[in-house]
Image (cartoon, grey):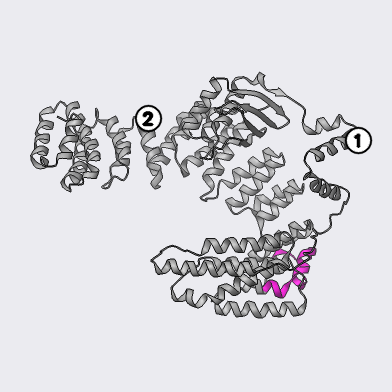
Amino acid sequence: MQFPSISEGVIRQNSTENSFSRGKEYDRAGSVVDVVQRGTMLQSEVEGTEVKPYRVTVEFDAGGVTAAHCTCPYEYGGWCKHIIATLLTCNRLPDQIEVRPTLVQLLDRLNPVQTQRLVQELVAAQPELIDWVDRQVHLMTNPQPAKTSRKPRRSPIDVTPFRRQVRHILREGIRELEYGCEHDPFGEALSELIDRARSFSQNGDGESALAILEAITQSYAEEWDELNEYGGEIYGIDQELNEAWTEAILSTDLDEAQAVDLQTMLEAWQDELQADFGMSLAALEQGWSDPTLQEILVGTISEAEFWLEERPDFTADLALIRLQILDRQNREAEYLNLARVAGLTKQYLTRLAESGEVETAISLAQTELSTLEEAIALSKTLRESNHLAEALDIAQQGLAFSSYERYDFAIWTGELAEGLSQPEIAIEAYQTAFGDRPSFDLYQRLPTLSGKGWKQLKPKLLKALRQADAWNSDEAKVTIFLHEEMWDDAIATVSKRYIYNPSLAYRVMDAVIPYQPDWVIDTAIPQADEIMNAGRSDKYSTAIEWLKRVKAAYVESERQAEWQTYRSSLVLTHGKKRKLIALLDAAKLS
């Protein structure tokens, strides 16, 4: 597959203005060297300020870039300048991309003896690889994967440090509350301890997880009275404990006596902590041998039949935890049966797609998708398995659902559509993104993409822009309205009783002074007067900025005499405010 040309609009969308500018400089300077493509992976070296060049890796498919990484320490959002430079260089000089064999193609050149020698030399150079090789050989030589097994611990885990840490966290938190702390001083640290317990469950050691959780919960309960007395609320901890207990219980083979003891403890803690451990208790009662659960796992009960009875509110959460365990144990058919019956559409459809049943997943998606989250998961799974057209179809379907995630997904959909030469779908996706979060970058991309259709598209975008009421949309509104010389719309955007972003108002004033000088004067004078009359010396520089626009508007409308009259009144009123008068003189507001 040839490396696709990535449009400048897509590159800009995935970078900050500064990163794009620097990346362009690197491209022009010829800093990108040794560009090599192996299958659907592109690698380059980019010479920078360090002795050793940075290494860029770009993964792609026919729809465009799927992932991009760089060895530089950049972490300020979007692609770094080295990634940008690599993509720009590939667009400008595609002939400089050296196509080399993929790993599969390289290995195909070797006979079995040579392949064995290669692996031996790799392990000799990196001894830690032997464990990975061991696991892979086991998987490859066992067609029916057994349940994931773990060597049992030779000694019980010491939970004393966990008890000590819980007591320390709670007592230090209470001390902070005594000193007037208003935030939650406990939650984050306790969550980290609970996560450590869950890591044991996730690695197949449910017994150690149970021991740790018992230490955490008991220590928490022992400090509860004092914590409650100080009004210490640990938001979400009860739910985290409930989930962790559930996972640990389902990851352990408990005998009847152990189950009874654990039930007694959970019920006591539930009362003492005023918590809800209903899901944990249900997991303890049902285990994996519950008759209804067994019917679900073997596929002899339908979703409709299961939901005929009233189920607890935690039913879906409990099923999700079971799915995580089934996944770790490679119990594919049981995973699908449980996800289907529990109504976990995202997990069900994505697992169908991952297991090769793409047509079934797509067919069901037409009627089963009900949230954007489900559409995102399925479309991205389809793309990862190289079903790009199908991924785009699902993405289009998903954009009909509203969600805070829709903007990012609409951009993802638009870029995929561009890569697949589907401009109409790309335009529709970008239009959705623009409606959710207007931006000048998007607005600039669409004329080229829509071509002759821009004349019909532009009014729709401007209508959406006027209707945008999010607090963070004003900058885009001002930038676009000024770009289109729509002065009244720009003025309306910043004409508010309280101007929380003076810099936007300055931009509008500077642009409309020749057309609306009276508005500038009528708006800027009250802003400046409020600061000066209050004697807010720390804000005098802001008052000066307003006054600069006042003077410019008077001059533009050939009313210098009125400016002089107003300035004289300022001196008369505020003449004793030396800092203000000095700033007036320094700004040449005479």
**In the picture provided, is 382 more to the left or to the right than 461?**
right
Residue lying at 58% horizontally and 53% vertically, measured from the top left: 371
The three-letter amino acid code for the residue at tag 2 is: His
Is the residue 220 above or below the residue 264 in the image?
A: above
Residue 393 placed where, x, y %?
64, 42
Residue 395 placed where, x, y %?
61, 43
Residue 48 falls in which quadrant of the image? top right
Nearer to the camera, 292 or 84: 84
The three-letter amino acid code for the residue at tag 1 is: Pro
Q: How many angstroms separate mark 2 from mark 1 (CA)?
A: 65 Å
Q: Give the range drawn in magenta.
A: 282-303
* Residue 72 visible at all: yes
N-terminal label among 2 and 1: 1
**In the picture provided, is 16 more to the left or to the right than 383?**
left
Could you tell me which quadrant the C terminus lies in?
Answer: top left
Nearer to the camera, 104 or 9: 104
* Residue 313 visible at all: no
Query: Which of the labelled discs sits on residue 483, or is there none?
Result: 2
Q: Is residue 323 magenta?
A: no
Residue lying at 81% horizontally and 30% vertically, measured from the top left: 105
Q: Is residue 286 magenta?
A: yes
